[in-house]
Amino acid sequence: MGQGHTAPLYTVVAEGSITTPKGFTAGGIHCGLKKTTRNDLGAIVCEVPAAAAGVYTTNVFQAAPLKVTRESIGEGGRLRAVLVNSGNANACTGEQGEADAYEMRNKFAERVGIAADEVAVASTGVIGELLKMDKVRSGISELPAKLASDKQAAESFCQAILTTDLVQKMVCVSVEIDGQLIHIAGAAKGSGMIHPNMATMLGFVTTDAEIGSEALQQLLREATNHTFNMITVDGDTSTNDMLVAMASGLAGNSELNPQHEGWAAFGAALRHVCEVLAKAIARDGEGATKLVEVQVRGAVSDASAQAIAKTVIGSSLVKSAVFGADANWGRIIAAVGRAGEPVNPDTVDISLGSIVTLQQSRPVAFDEEKALEYLKGDTVVIHVDLHMEEGAATAWGCDLTYDYVRINAAYRT
């Protein structure tokens, strides 16, 4: 809920989905891009032009769909639909891959009766292989009939965007602004090739709030910096990462902007949606058995705390120790020390949950059996206090297991 407030700023909608906000439908089908029978083509459609915003991978090699989506949103900050396929990333596929991405956009726009530049496109899967466009075309013809506003349709979309994910990732919250109940919902995929600065993840946010594209872009970027950019599974940043938000404006509130009294509440609700999805991606890391959270405080700045938290959460040695339930705090302090940020080597505290292992940079006797029991749980929280200034940050990841190697050793087969 809303942290630091006497009353919650927003409410989690337990049975909500990406189609709960007014104006949205969604759906998914299996068109044959995957060897399994799981859905592999999905779409979200808005009944009106929606204010849109996007955040993309920092990888130099950006997949063809990202170019198409940037172009669509850049035309006027409005979207009516997003079309997504899994099973093939359409990345590093040259001019043909780019032509295929544009064809996906154009054919879906024609099929649902909207302008081509109102459609975003996203893809995820194997890099370097051309799309089987005959199957994609067939799927685009069939998909509109599957679009609906119920939760089952939303779940069929969520299945369509998965690759090695084991679970669907979806969340919805509500917040009251101007006497109107506004909904914000999100769906995401991501399991491997996950690293801060966007990862092999696709995320989609829908809301019925009235908000302009620039204001939505500002809030989406801020939320991303504290959530999706604070997760890592394996230190690899993908070619396809994308987070797209669409606001239908049908809730009936006055337009949100930084001066609006509901701005903070809406921003907190959006950040919660992104945080839930980010943590779900980290927990569902390929082969993972537990979610790992690193909380850093006492740093010289929030940015410094972020860098340290991401270094600890990304350490293969730390991740391996967590998998083995080994309370090896030495690996944690080594990661803190190599983060390239200001650290006083005489004032660091480290705890595993409530178990203090290091105080003022000196070892503290602790119950190894109690630590073992804690580390065997499905969530492990590592606390690092630098005792310098007020900077703080939290990062999320997972343990590094034998199954991670097995999954990625045979990803294409």
Image: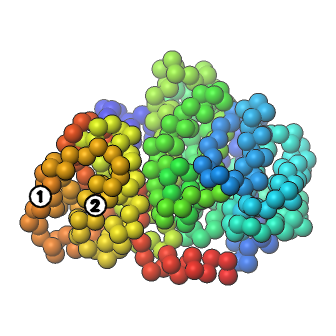
Query: In the drawing, does residue 360 fall left or right of residue 176?
Result: left
Q: Which residue is drawn at 42% across and 34% down?
A: 9
Q: Name the residue under label 2.
A: 334
Residue 362's label in the rendered image is 1
Q: Residue 319, position in %: x, y?
A: 37, 68
Q: What element carries label 1?
A: strand
In this view of the protein, can residue 153 be seen by the observer?
no
Q: Which quarter of the picture shows residue 125?
A: bottom right
Separation of residues labelled 2 and 1 (CA atoms): 14 Å
Q: Which residue is drawn at 80% across and 72% down?
A: 32
Q: Is mark 2 on a helix, strand or loop?
A: helix
Q: Which of 152 and 52 is in front in this view?
A: 52
For the residue marked with disc 2, what is the amino acid?
A: Ala
Are the residues flagged by discs 2 and 1 in contact, CB closer than 8 Å?
A: no
10 Å crowding of disc 2: few (<14), some (14-19), many (20+): some
Q: Which residue is drawn at 19% across and 42% down?
A: 387
Query: In the drawing, does residue 330 fall left or right of residue 409?
Result: left
Q: Residue at x 72, y 32 (%)?
A: 77
Q: Which of 68 and 386 is in front in this view?
A: 386
Query: In the drawing, does residue 146 fall left or right of residue 320?
Result: right
Quadrant occupied by the N terminus: top left
Residue 12's label in the rendered image is none
For the residue marked with disc 1, what is the amino acid?
A: Arg
